[in-house]
Image (cartoon, rainbow, N blue to C red):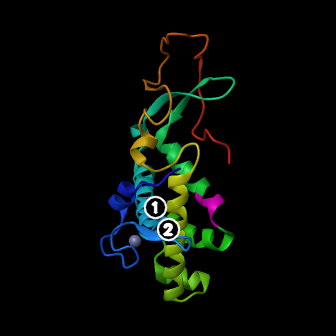
Amino acid sequence: MQWTRSETLALAQQSCTYCYGLGLKQGRSGVSTPCNCVFRAIFRACYARFKQCTSKEKYVSRVSLESNPGRQRKSVWGLKNEEFIADFCLVSRRTLDEKQHKLFSYHFLLGADWKMCCRKLNMDRGTFFHELYRIEGKLGRTFRELEPHALFPLDEYFSSTGRSQVATVTPFPVQTEKPAQTKPIFKFPVRRAA
Ligand SMILES: [Zn+2]
């Protein structure tokens, strides 16, 4: 994927001392790369949505009929919120190393504060926050650059336009235009294998 100046500018932290709010910093080879504050902003947005999805009651979840690309082209029932929760956890598991994932689980998934994490992981406050920023940056970048379906921008992930032929429907049998090709099968959240 290609990063654009307008995208990094919108996400950058105005008080950032590395990029001065521009969202881009000069790399060693003279090529501009997105600043860590941009990646962290992406992570925070995804984490906020993750918390929102996990706190919702089951019946609020949105069910949508989505076409599954590939040779068989079957349509599947998707639960957006549950998919996002699964993606958030699985991508983090794959991206982080074991030590980082432990901190990530304690702090972001289990809600332990820095004091509890430091005690459990046997590290000081400075090391904890240094590691936390690195994790946020690493995950933010992955969430945005993930192929073929990035977790960020969130509206693209949750909207129908991000994927081909996605239609929001009621969870009851529906008459489709081409029943033979779009035979719905009921399938639970995780569409992409780990
Ligand atoms: Zn910055």
Q: Is residue 153 magenta?
A: no
Residue type beneath disc 2? Glu
- Horizontal side, residue 113 vs residue 92: left or right: left
Residue 87 % position (x, y): 56, 49
Q: Residues within 10 Å of mark 1 (few under 14, many from 20)?
A: many
The residue at the far left in this view is 14
Q: Which mark is residue 34?
A: none
Percent position of residue 59, x then y: 41, 37
Instruction: Tell me the SS state at disc 1.
Output: helix
Please report the residue visible at 61 percent of the width from the left and 72 percent of the height from the top: 100
- The span shown in magenta is 92-96
Identify the residue position indicated by label 1 in the image. Answer: 43
Q: Nearer the viewer, residue 47 or 39?
A: 39
Residue 158 in the image, given as x and y percentages of width and height:
43, 40
| Residue at horizontal 47 percent and vertical 69 percent from the top | 111
Residue 35: image quadrant is bottom left
Name which residue type carries label 1.
Phe
User: Is residue 95 covered in magenta?
Assistant: yes
Q: Which quadrant of the picture is home to ligand 1?
A: bottom left
Q: Is mark 1 within 8 Å of ligand 1?
A: no
Q: Which residue is mark 2?
A: 136
Residue, far front: 30
Task: Please report contact status of discs 1 and 2: CB closer than 8 Å, yes or no.
Answer: yes
Crowding at mark 2 (Cα within 10 Å: few <14, some 14-19, many 20+): many
Q: Residue at x 42, y 48 (%)?
A: 154
Between 85 and 178, the one nearer to me in the picture: 178
SS assignment for the magenta stretch, majority = helix
For the point 50% across and 49% down, the residue is 151
Of the image marks 1 and 2, the number of the one nearer the N terminus: 1
Q: Is 51 placed above or below 63 here? A: below
Locate residue 42, reporting x and y percent.
43, 59
Q: CA distance from mark 1 to mark 2?
A: 6 Å
